[in-house]
Image (cartoon, rainbow, N blue to C red):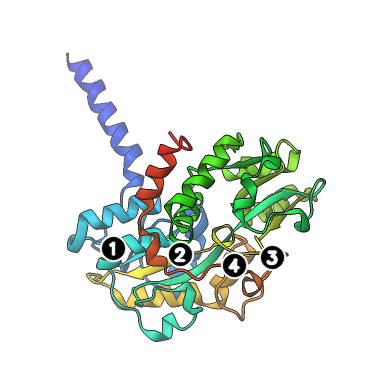
Amino acid sequence: MIRSLSKFAIILLFLFVITTPACLDSTDDADLTIYSGRRETLVAPVIERFSNASGLKVRVKYGESSHISAILLEEGKKTKADIFLAQDPASLGSVLSLLTPLPSDILDQVPPWARSDVGLWVGVSARARVVAYNTKKYSDADMPDDLMGFVERQWKDRMGWNPRSTSSQVMVTAMRVLWGETKTLAWLNGLRANSTHIFASNTSALAAVASGEIDAAFVNHYYLHQALAQTGADLPVANYHPRAGGPGALIMVTGGGVLSTASHQANALEFLNFLLASESQDYFSNTLYEYPLKTDVRTSLASRSLSSISHPRLNFEDFMDIGGTQRLLRETGTIP
């Protein structure tokens, strides 16, 4: 009996140890507490640079943006978070009631379309939705003007995407805003009728384009740049920004907002300024292959500049209804 209890205790201790890293360390002695919806592998380097440069002790809670925003809503005024970093505008929009207005000297560092209309959050970097296509078969000139063209019969069994990804769901949410429910439903049903391939990740969708398994895929622009950097070889793939704009040319921002209950608001604002400084913008651009939002930062991206892309200027607070998009995806059999 004692041995069984010991084993049980060991199991409990093991479970505590392996789950604790997913939880937030004690924030009592922190100078800044960040709730991050961006993966640790992506933003930990820039957070560490900030901590070293400022001398501030920083604590971070990592998780999916939608999960972190749900935690913030549950915690409400009792949250220990000073700042929320989000992977997408939908997550920021869902917690607007918890955020405090940002000063104009921070907001004015980015274009008007890359910040909250009511000044509650600011964009930090940007990602473009594209159609990645196989250059052995097509050129930009062969691509349809907008996404609706990709449900034509000529693309049957030749397209792919990952509808479970947040970026894909943000794109479909943009469709609902720009096109309305009826046209969006027709597009989703058109993909299904065309036997569009479903991939577990955007990386695998891009690989299928490169191998010729499919002809094109709906992804974010940086997957191609990451693949080129990792393989060190030319791939027969190019990014196409739909010439007519619309949801297929959507520019999605990652961003941050300061909690109105933050115990360290001044430090949170200092961190936002650091993210928009040239060094951090250079990191987002030339290491993560995202678009910098500061126009004076040079980028190594071989793709088009943000200013040359005909992308829709949307009120990012319109992206709050991701839940409605997920219901639509389930109704059409696009996701389980």
Q: Position of residue 189 (x, y in %)?
A: 52, 40
Work out whether mark 1 precedes mark 4 in sequence or the reverse, and give the earlier one.
Answer: 1
In which quadrant of the rendered view does residue 104 lie?
Answer: bottom left
Q: Are marks 3 and 1 in contact (CB under 8 Å)?
A: no
Q: Are marks 2 and 1 in contact (CB under 8 Å)?
A: no
- Above/below status of 89 relative to 122: above
Q: Are marks 4 and 3 in contact (CB under 8 Å)?
A: yes
Is residue 255 visible to the viewer in this orientation of the structure?
A: yes
Question: Disc 3 marks which residue?
Answer: 301
User: In the rendered structure, which amino acid carries the disc numbered 1?
Assistant: Ala
Give the x, y percent position of residue 302. Answer: 73, 64
Q: Secondary structure at mark 3?
A: loop
Q: Give the label, 1 or 4, closer to the camera.
A: 4
Q: Nearer the viewer, residue 322 or 70?
A: 322
Q: Which residue is mark 2?
A: 47
Residue drawn at the location 41% of the way across and 44% of the way down: 328
Between 252 and 250, the one nearer to me in the picture: 250
Q: Residue type at mark 3?
A: Leu
Quarter of the image with the C terminus in it: top left
The numbered mark at residue 81 is: 1
How far from the left and from the top, in percent, is residue 186? 51, 45
Q: Nearer the viewer, mark 2 or mark 1?
A: 1
Q: Nearer the viewer, mark 3 or mark 1?
A: 3
Q: Name the kind of residue labelled 2 in the image.
A: Ile
Residue at x 59% of width, y 67% of height? 291
Q: Earlier in the sequence, mark 4 or mark 2?
A: 2
218 relative position to 117: left or right: right
Measured Cα–Cα span from mark 3 to mark 1: 34 Å
Measured Cα–Cα span from mark 4 to mark 3: 8 Å
Instruction: Looking at the image, tell me whether mark 2 or mark 3 is earlier in sequence order.
Output: 2
Q: Say whether disc 2 or disc 1 marks the residue closer to the N-terminus.
A: 2
